[in-house]
Amino acid sequence: MASTPPPLMKKHSQTDLVSRLKSRKVLGVGGEDDDGEVHRSKISQMLGNEMKFAVREPIGLRLWLLISAVLFTSTSLMALAFPSQLYEIIFEITTSRISIRLYGGALLCISLILWNGLYTAEKVIIQWTLLTEACYFGVQFLVTSITLLEMGTLSNSAIILLLSETFFLFVTLSYYHHLGRRSKKI
């Protein structure tokens, strides 16, 4: 008579607390490390605590991104809807509507980048957003200055535009510089 072997009993280590504790002890997780941090898994122990890598944002960065996004969006919508009036306000002459509408479309694209930068927590995306904004203000300052030199006239609205471009460029570059610095270890 052939005897059948007894069925194998499978051990559920997930429910066996002693076995689970031994496994965690062998892996080296669950206890405090040298920094006093308690890791829940080997992965978090290897990667480290994500709070160490959190971006320390300069004061007012999110407000600046919000203001920039609103200004870019409103200016782009004004350029798309009322192209003649926007150009006449600054340069006090009329021009083709198609060029102002293209300008409005480009501003709308930049405003979408700014809105994305406002809602992200990644440092690299915020830096690229600020760099995009700074490049725009730099190019706009050069184009406006050259256009005013070619026309030979300087209106009050053009002076305000040049000053505001310089101010926005300075603030944006200072946030970009501050965000790019390494934080000091405490």
Image: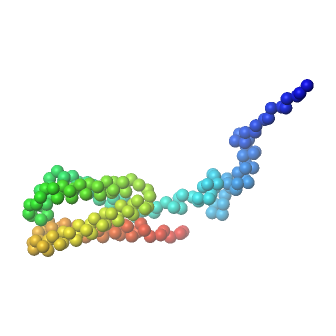
Quadrant location of residue 38?
bottom right
What residue do we see at 73% from left, 50% from top? 23
Residue at the farthest top position:
1
Question: Which residue occupies 14% across, 63% down?
Answer: 90
Residue 125 versus residue 161: which sits nearer the camera?
125
Q: For the N terminus, which image quadrant? A: top right
Identify the residue at horizontal 80%, vertical 32% (top origin): 7
Picture quadrant where residue 136 is located: bottom left
Residue 101 is situated, as x and y percent measured from the top left of the image, at: 18, 55
Q: Using the rendered image of the protein, determine whether residue 85 is visible from the camera's viewpoint.
A: no
Q: Residue at x 79, y 35 (%)?
A: 8
**Residue 116 sits above or below residue 183 on the image:** above
Could you tell me if residue 139 is visible in this image?
A: yes
Position of residue 50 in the picture relative to residue 119 (left or right): right
Quarter of the figure with residue 83:
bottom left
Provide residue 53's location: percent of width, then percent of height.
51, 61
